[in-house]
Image: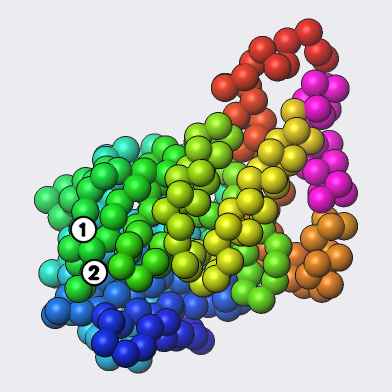
Amino acid sequence: MAVVIKLSLGTRPGTWYLSLPFQNENGLLGPYILAGQNEVALIDPGPGITVPALLTSLQEVGFEPRDVTHLLLTHIHLDHAGATGELLRRMPKATVYVHSNGAPHLVDPTKFIASATRIYGDKMYEMWGDIESVPAERIQAIKGGDILNIAGRRLEVHYTPGHAIHHVIFFDVHTGELFAGDAAGVRLQGINYVRPPAPPPDLDLEAWSASIDKLKQLRPDTLYLAHCGPADNPTQVLEHLREKLLSWGDIVLNAMREGKSEEEIIHLLTIKTEPEALRIVRDPNVLKRLDLMANYPMTVQGYMRYWRKKHPERLEGYA
């Protein structure tokens, strides 16, 4: 069962977070709803597997699928946007807003599905459900610097690569609310621990660090994380993320220079980082929940590709 959390009160446009059930867990992912001036927007609607829960939760808030006018995507990864094509069949008034780098892969998801299948293998459908193409005429390509006047809000679009080359965030300068996608990392509610979601093929540490600087310069009051809900300590979250991104990268780099295999590096990264996480979360089951959003094998694959692609000189002369 989904959990609906109302995030704003008073005269401001309505804002809700829908915590959708994913892999038999709640509190891991879900879209944000913005409503106002006869418009309804969903930010990062999620994967196809969660569509039934999303539609039920939407009705619980008081809206029907036909009321939705905008789907805003921070990026096109399946946990954020996999449901987009299916939802458009149910939402005849909705337009999709996505960075120009991601738009072609919504229209023709063949290459993107093939890339994801290399990561998830025979668990693809179990994890993400159906993935449908998006009609090109229903897509509005966006870029950094754009302004979206949607649902009574003025949302600034900022390009934030690092996690993905098609990643943007949406910032409401009037309320200080920043819809961060994965640019601010993965953080479970009530737990002061941030894990870097670093999948292949687009991980770029330099670009991500610059994106973190950009987010800090915006001075948001609240980060609305896709995983998992609001964070009211933006500077702390962002600096924790940067520290983890760089330190985990060093662990993988040093292991690659020593000639370790991918399997050995996964084991090494796990034993070097899990003790700190366990001291903070104090519950091994919480670590399993984090793994559903940013697991070690996917993370190591992302880092290994990054070092080979972006800094092969760091690997020269080693085993």
Q: Main secondary structure of the magenta part?
A: helix
Q: Residue at x 55, y 61 (%)?
A: 234
Query: How many discs appear?
Result: 2
- Dot 1 amino acid type: Leu
Q: Tell me, yes or no, whether the highlighted magenta stretch contains residue 47.
A: no
Image position of 274 with respect to 67: above or below: above
Using the rendered view, name the quadrant where residue 112 is placed.
Answer: top left
Which of these two is toward me, 216 or 265? 216
**How far apart are the two marked residues, 2 and 1, measured between alpha carbons?**
8 Å
| Residue that sits furthest to the top in the current view | 317
Magenta-highlighted residues: 254-273
- In the rendered image, which residue does mark 1 sit on? 148
**Which numbered marker is on residue 170?**
none
Q: Are marks 2 and 1 in contact (CB under 8 Å)?
A: yes
Which of these two is toward me, 44 or 24? 44
Image position of 291 with respect to 208: above or below: below
- In the rendered image, which residue does mark 2 sit on? 153
Using the rendered view, name the quadrant where residue 319 is placed.
Answer: top right
Where does residue 313 sit, x and y in percent of width and height? 66, 12
Q: Residue at x 18, y 50 (%)?
A: 140
Helix or strand or loop: what does disc 2 sit on?
A: strand
Helix or strand or loop: what does disc 1 sit on?
A: strand
Q: Residue at x 48, y 68 (%)?
A: 222
